[in-house]
């Protein structure tokens, strides 16, 4: 796991977008795993900017989103299909027929099974983009989730519901169930990019990077992934014990790459 610490939320987005663009330009038909929530918004804007400038194309890209709420339609303003269309897909040259998001209406168990199978049929994720919940969840894999889990229905914790309540009005139905890729599904991605910003994520960042491998912090499974890059701002990194070492590793890695290329 490579940990990159930058000064600000905007720098997290810029560094992450640079990595994504380089990845896609090297594999123009990449399959991306995409995340929702507030963390990737700045990243997506940076990718939109690169697409508008002509330095990045999504024309041959396929995408699979991590999760979707159960019980709201695709055109609901809080659905993740609506979110992705508004925040990314409508502004880039991706073919929306190649963008996959779990279907939250109908039989959710069948939808989850079909989603996992479709992902396998298309060869899996090349680059998985992740945020992290304040309780350490990735996707909607809440604490106690099996590290061997696959795409399935999950009950959201009270903390996750409270954290996401800011997106719903007081008189609006807020789902307590979701379909999410499982931890084992995420772990099969060839490359993982996790972004975290702000003090509210500092405990989760410390626990998943430096804590024990545990279902109590689902993101800690990434300690076992061979190609994970974590980009965090100073506020999210404030509790890391080995912060100075991570900064040293970044410096030495850049020095080595410069000498080789």
Image (cartoon, helix red, strand yellow):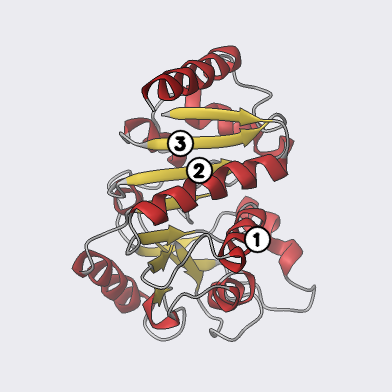
For mark 3, what is the residue? 229
Between discs 3 and 2, the one toward the N terminus: 2
Q: Is residue 118 left or right of residue 76?
A: left
Image point 39% across, 66% down: which residue? 64
For mark 2, what is the residue? 194
Q: Nearer the viewer, residue 150 or 64?
A: 64
**Placement of 43 over or under 73, stated as above or below:** above
Could you tell me residue 105's position as x and y percent?
46, 84
At mark 3, the secondary structure is strand
Could you tell me residue 26's position as x and y percent?
35, 52
Q: Is residue 261 left or right of residue 160?
A: left
Place residue 91 in its image quadrant.
bottom right
For mark 1, what is the residue? 45
- Quarter of the image for the C terminus: give it: top left
Mark 1 vs mark 3: in front:
1
Instruction: Tell me how far mark 2 sits from mark 1, CA to CA.
Output: 17 Å
Could you tell me residue 27's position as x and y percent?
33, 56
Image point 58% across, 41% down: which residue? 15
Instruction: Tell me how far mark 1 sits from mark 3, CA to CA.
Output: 20 Å
Between discs 2 and 1, the one toward the N terminus: 1
């Amino acid at each position: 796991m490579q940990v990159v610490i930058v000064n600000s939320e905007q720098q997290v987005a810029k560094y992450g977008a640079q990595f994504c663009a380089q990845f896609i330009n090297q594999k123009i038909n990449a399959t991306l795993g995409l995340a929702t929530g507030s963390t990737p918004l700045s990243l997506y804007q940076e990718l939109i900017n690169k697409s508008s400038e002509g330095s990045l194309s999504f024309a041959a890209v396929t995408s699979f989103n991590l999760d979707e709420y159960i019980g709201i339609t695709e055109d609901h303003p809080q659905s993740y299909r609506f979110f992705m269309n508004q925040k990314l897909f409508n502004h880039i040259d991706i073919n929306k027929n190649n963008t996959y998001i779990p279907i939250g209406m109908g039989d959710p168990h069948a939808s989850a099974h079909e989603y996992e199978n479709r992902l396998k049929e298309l060869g899996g994720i090349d680059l998985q983009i992740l945020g992290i919940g304040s309780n350490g969840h990735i996707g909607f894999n809440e604490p106690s989730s099996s590290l061997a889990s696959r795409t399935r229905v999950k009950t959201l914790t009270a903390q996750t519901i409270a954290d996401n309540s800011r997106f719903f009005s007081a008189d609006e139905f807020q789902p307590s169930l979701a379909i999410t890729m499982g931890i084992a599904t995420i772990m099969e991605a060839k490359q993982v990019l996790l972004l975290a910003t702000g003090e509210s994520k500092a405990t989760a960042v410390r626990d998943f990077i430096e804590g024990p491998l545990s279902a109590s912090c689902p993101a800690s499974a990434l300690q076992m992934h061979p190609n994970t890059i974590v980009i965090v701002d100073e506020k999210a990194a404030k509790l890391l014990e080995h912060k100075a070492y991570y900064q040293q590793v970044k410096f030495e890695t850049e020095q080595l790459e410069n000498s080789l290329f």
